Image: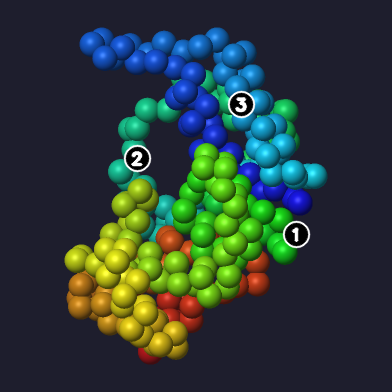
Amino acid sequence: MHLLIDGDPIVYRIGFASQTKDKETGEVTADPVSHTLHSCKLFIEGMLYDTGSTSYAVFLTGKNNFRHTVRDDYKANRKGADKPVHYQAIRDYMVKKFQAQVVDKIEADDALALAQTEDSCIATVDKDLLMVPGSHYNYVKKEFTEVSEDEGTRFFFEQMLTGDKVDNITGIRGIGPVKAKKLLEETKREGWEAMVLEKYEEAFAPDGFQRAVENSQLLWMLQRNRSMPMEFKNESKT
C-alpha cells in the first residue's frame, strides 16, 4: 500500500510535545532539536510499520495558498498563534529524511486528495479529507476508514451547511452536524445543491449565492477526476 502522509499536523504534534511552557512566566523550554527530530523519525516509521505500507509520500503546505485569495478571513482565527520552537527544523528534517514535498498555492490536504488512488491510503487527523473517496488512516487513533463516493459528497454538503470553525468558515446559523445530516436525509440527492443554496440565500441575503461559491471553494478538497458540484462553481448566477 502507498501511504499519503499529511505532514502538517505531525510538525505541530511533535513540536509541541517536545516543549513545555511555564504556567507562571509563559517561558517555553524546548527539548534538544536532535531529540525532537528523533521523535519525528519514530512517529513516521511507526506509522509505516502499523499500516504495512510498502511506499509513501509526505506532503507539507507551502506558500501562496489560493484560498486566501477567495476570502481574506480564511483561517484568520489562527493568525498570531504560536508555532513550536522547532517548527522549521522539523519541516526541514521531513524534507531531508522523508523527501517531503512542500506544495505551493494549494494545501497539503489538496495534494493528498489529488494523489489518492485505488491503491493508496490518506494518513491524517484532518476530518476535512473525509470527503475524498478511498482508504483513510487516522495516525493518532490508529484507525482505518473507507470512504465511498456518496459518503465523500455527503460530507462536503454537511460542511457547506455547518461551516468549519477550525478554518474560520461560517456556515448557516442554527445548523449543526445533527441538523445538517437530517436536512440531507430529508432531501433527495439531486436536490442537495438547491436546498443548500436556498439556506445560503436566506442566511446571507443579498449575497447568499456569492457566499455559497466562496465557501464551496474554501471547503472543497481538489480531487483527481472529481469536479465541484455544478451549482457552486465560480460562475455568475443565471
CB-based contact (under 8 Å), mark 2 and mark 1: no
Q: Is residue 225 visible?
A: yes
Residue positioned most to the right: 54
The quadrant where residue 209 appears: bottom left
For the point 46% across and 13% down, the residue is: 30
**Tag on residue 119?**
1
Q: Is residue 153 left or right of residue 96?
A: left
For the point 60% across and 22% down, the residue is: 39
- Indicate which disc, 3 or 2, sits on the residue closer to the N terminus: 3
The quadrant where residue 95 appears: top right
- Indicate which disc, 2 or 1, sits on the residue closer to the N terminus: 2
Q: Is residue 174 left or right of residue 196?
A: left
Residue 161 on image: x %, y %: 32, 69
- Indicate which disc, 1 or 3, sits on the residue closer to the N terminus: 3
Q: For numbered disc 1, what is the local secondary structure?
A: loop
Separation of disc 1 and disc 3 at Cα? 26 Å
For the point 33% across and 33% down, the residue is: 80
Residue 85 on image: x %, y %: 46, 19
Q: Nearer the viewer, residue 222 or 123?
A: 123
Q: Is residue 223 visible?
A: no
In the rendered image, the vertical position of residue 202 relative to residue 7, given as above or below: below
In the rendered image, the vertical position of residue 165 relative to residue 78, given as above or below: below
Q: Which residue is mark 3?
A: 40
